[in-house]
Each structure stands twice: as structure tokens, then as C-alpha cells.
Amino acid sequence: MRSTLSTLLGWVVLTCAFLLAFGLYLQHVVGLEPCPMCIVQRYTMVGVMVLGLVGWRLRNSTALTVVGVLLALKAGFGAFVAARQSWLQWYPPEAVSCGRDFYGMIESFPLGRAIPMIFRGSGDCTKVDWTFLGGSIANWSFACFALFTVLGLWLARQAWRQR
């Protein structure tokens, strides 16, 4: 069973790496500018990937249980942010107030002021620039984070049962 859990975590890591690379492709090759909610989702995806790497190397069932729970919590947060962005895209507010562009904030403000501003979002959060099979980037991000949440809970359950 340990090899199944390790393989599952390996797939989580590879999937996260692919999704992050695709996001960077959309930004730097296609020219789509990420909004602050997208950036928060990227950081969360990196967190899921790091937890997957840590769990992939662990052999202790108790530690794997903790990693599974943390992975589910981290991915659940990502799903929440993606769901919020999807909601904003489906029902855009009259006055868009997600915040400023990430790079503009870093260039214009000291880091201590810029980082809290990132989590306020920007007007770009409601814009749908790219779709695949009818779903926006936020919709697909939600689906991936929801899958990672379920996998993290399943991993924690399986590791707990192996104790």
C-alpha cells in the first residue's frame, strides 16, 4: 500500500508542476496577465506540490497522515479561492474592486505594503481571458484543487489505517 501512496503523491507533484508550467506559459507566451487571485492560487499550488514532495519521501504512516491532512487543507484553500474567482466571473460586481496588478504593486510600494495588497485582488479577477471545454482558468483550477483535497483526505485515511 505504501507504494500506492507514494505513486499517488508523485502524480500530485507532476500534475502541480504541469499546471504551474502551463500557467507560466499562458502568462509569458500567450500574454495573459494574472490577477492577484491567480497568484494566490499559484502559491497554493506550489504549497500542494511541496507537501506532495515531502509525503513522497516519507515512510512513517503517522507523518503521512499529517501530510495528507495538510495537503487537503492547502488544496481546500486553493479551491475556495478558485471558487470565489469563478463566482466573480459568473456574477461580476458593478464596481470591480480586486486591487492592483501584482508587479505594479511590487514596483510602486515597499514589500511590507505590497504583500497585503496582493490578497485584496484586482479588477482583472472577473475577466475571462481563456477557456477550455467551456471552463475558465479559475473553473479548472477549482476542479484540480478539489481533486487534490479529496486525494489528500484519502491519503490521510489510508495512512491512518496503516498505523
Image (cartoon, rainbow, N blue to C red):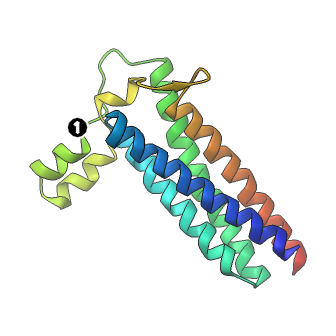
What amino acid type should be assigned to the residue bearing mark 1? Arg
- What x and y, as percent, mark residue 36? 34, 42
Residue 11 in view (yes/no)? yes
- What x and y, as percent, mark residue 122? 29, 34
Considering depth in this image, is 24 or 47 the residue closer to the camera? Answer: 24
User: Residue placed farthest to the bottom in the image?
Assistant: 60
Does 114 sit above or below residue 98?
below
Does 142 sit above or below residue 76?
above
Give the side of residue 84 with respect to residue 113, left or right.
right
Q: Residue at x 60, y 71 (%)?
A: 53
Instruction: Please identify the quadrant where the C terminus is shown.
Output: bottom right
- Label 1: few (<14), some (14–19) or many (≥20) C-alpha neighbours in 10 Å: some
Instruction: Tell me which corner region of the image, top left, top right, bottom left or bottom right, holds residue 70.
Output: bottom right
Residue 34 in view (yes/no)? no
Give the side of residue 12 with respect to residue 90, left or right.
right
Does 118 sit above or below residue 156?
above
- What x and y, as percent, mark residue 124? 32, 29
- What x and y, as percent, mark residue 40? 41, 49
User: Residue placed farthest to the top in the image?
Assistant: 94
Exactly how many numbered labels are in the figure?
1
Instruction: Tell me which corner region of the image, top left, top right, bottom left or bottom right, holds residue 127.
Output: top left
Give the side of residue 85 with respect to residue 28, left or right.
right
Residue under pointer 1: 100
Does 77 sit above or below residue 33?
below
Q: Residue at x 33, y 14 (%)?
A: 94
User: What element does badge 1 sit on?
Assistant: loop
Considering depth in this image, is 129 or 157 the residue closer to the camera? Answer: 129
Instruction: Please identify the quadrant where the N terminus is shown.
Output: bottom right
Q: Residue at x 71, y 60 (%)?
A: 152
Q: Residue at x 80, y 59 (%)?
A: 154
